[in-house]
Image (cartoon, rainbow, N blue to C red):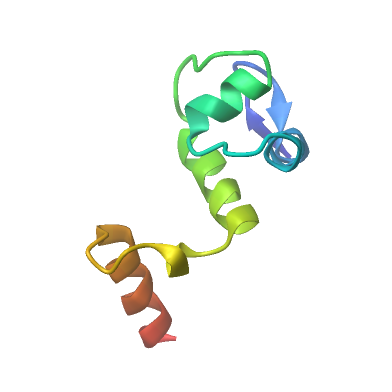
Amino acid sequence: MIVCSCNVFSDHQVRDALATSSGVRSPGEVYRCLGCSPQCGRCARTIRAIMDQVHGSCAACPAECPAASLTAKLIAAE
């Protein structure tokens, strides 16, 4: 699926960038790995979601991390 219409890259390209580049921690770094830069920014959330899928959940986050506490609540609700 196309993730970014402005730069025309797909979810497969994002996954490939994450697999071949160690230490990619933000959507901005994904753009750089793909040789482009953010335009409108609408795809940043989708890139982040793909990153979360590839890197796993926030289980390694410190307890004080707001995202970790939200993830724990979502898991408990399931």
Residue at coordinates 60% horizontally, 48% vertically from top-left? 50
* Image-based side of 7 in relation to 29, left or right: right
Which image quadrant is residue 16 in?
top right
Could one spot residue 43 in this view of the protein? no
* Image-based side of 22 in relation to 42, left or right: right
Residue at coordinates 57% horizontally, 39% vertically from top-left? 23
Horizontal and vertical percent for residue 27? 50, 32
* Quadrant in which the C terminus is drawn: bottom left
As drawn, 65 above or below 43 = below
Which image quadrant is residue 15 in?
top right
* Image-based side of 53 in relation to 1, left or right: left
Residue at coordinates 62% horizontally, 13% vertically from top-left? 36
Horizontal and vertical percent for residue 20? 76, 36
* Quadrant in which the N terminus is drawn: top right
Horizontal and vertical percent for residue 38? 50, 17
As drawn, 11 above or below 61 = above
As drawn, 49 above or below 59 = above
Horizontal and vertical percent for residue 54? 64, 54
Residue at coordinates 54% horizontally, 54% vertically from top-left? 52
